[in-house]
Image (spheres, rainbow, N blue to C red):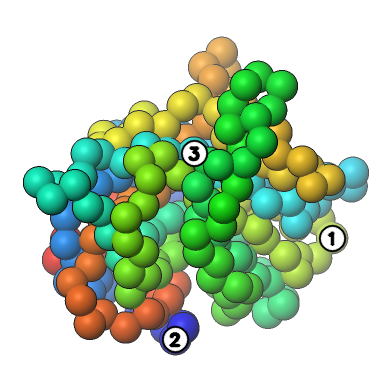
């Protein structure tokens, strides 16, 4: 896949700056939206990233189990375009990467009777984060993943971070299209476990994410766009 760095009018602020600012980045043409958890009014202004014993951002894979909105009249659903947002320290070394994966929930059931992420439907491979800290939105186009199940799990895996680094996915929720439970998956020592975190007394565990179909002929491309997900305007 080609990786492009978009140039925006949006500033990458610190972790507490959530003021929406319209960008000049124009996303590629997309088809119908069938999962949406990007409403700025439902932004939690917190991020989650797994940590190791030293309190640093670890390489544990983690992400959200989601259910798509109903398919169209033909009963088919083709995923072509996704985007999610994350926050990282402002100063990066250039070694940092993220890897995006998509799974069917077809794995063995856990102790709670929940089917774990199983068959892998897509793997982006390591994506260089291009020394871009702060708020960023990662966009992948041209996926052409056909006949997806109604429920899937998407995950990220960060790697290459220096000692003391923290960061992770931004929390939103609940989604305004589709569904997500109030927990998420994390892979610890090769075992999938469910987790929750809270802001005050309120448990939350949904991450900012959108899924669209894409017209045929859109090439596979990755965009790293500085700023919050709702500030990236385009032609959905």
**Residue 216, quarter of picture:** bottom left
How far apart are the alpha carbons under marks 2 and 3? 27 Å
Count residues near mark 3 (Cα–Cα under 10 Å), then give few for <14, some for 14-19, many for 20+.
many
Tag 1, which secondary structure?
A: loop
Q: Position of residue 201 (x, y in %)?
A: 56, 13
Foreground tag (1 vs 2): 2
Foreground tag (2 vs 3): 3
How far apart are the alpha carbons under marks 1 and 2? 30 Å
Q: Which residue is disc 2 drawn over?
A: 2
Q: Which residue is disc 1 drawn over?
A: 163
Q: Earlier in the sequence, mark 3 or mark 1?
A: 3
Q: Position of residue 187 (x, y in %)?
A: 72, 44
Q: Position of residue 122 (x, y in %)?
A: 50, 64
Name the residue rendered at 65%, 19% in the picture: 112
**Relative to 179, is 49 above or below?**
below
Q: Which residue is disc 3 drawn over?
A: 65
Count residues near mark 2 (Cα–Cα under 10 Å), then give few for <14, some for 14-19, many for 20+.
few
Name the residue rendered at 50%, 47% in the picture: 104
């Amino acid at each position: 896949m080609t990786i492009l760095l978009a140039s925006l009018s949006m500033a990458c602020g610190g972790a507490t700056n959530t003021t929406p600012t319209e960008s000049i980045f124009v996303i590629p043409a997309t088809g119908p939206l069938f999962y949406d958890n990007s409403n700025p009014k439902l932004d939690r202004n917190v991020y989650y990233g797994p940590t190791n014993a030293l309190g640093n951002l670890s390489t544990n894979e983690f992400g959200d189990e989601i259910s798509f909105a109903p398919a169209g009249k033909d009963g088919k659903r083709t995923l072509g375009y996704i985007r999610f947002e994350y926050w990282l320290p402002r100063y990066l070394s250039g070694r940092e990467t993220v890897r995006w994966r998509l799974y069917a929930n077809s794995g063995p059931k856990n102790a709670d009777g929940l089917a774990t992420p199983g068959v892998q439907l897509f793997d982006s491979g390591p994506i260089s984060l291009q020394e871009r800290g702060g708020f960023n939105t990662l966009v992948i186009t041209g996926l052409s993943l056909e006949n997806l199940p109604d429920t899937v799990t998407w995950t990220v895996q960060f790697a290459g971070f220096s000692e003391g680094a923290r960061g992770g996915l931004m929390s939103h929720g609940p989604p305004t299209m589709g569904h997500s439970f109030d927990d998420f998956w994390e892979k610890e020592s090769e075992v999938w476990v469910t987790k929750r975190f809270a802001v005050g007394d309120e448990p939350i565990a949904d991450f900012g994410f959108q899924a669209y179909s894409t017209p045929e002929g859109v090439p596979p491309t990755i965009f790293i766009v500085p700023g919050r997900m709702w500030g990236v305007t385009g032609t959905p």
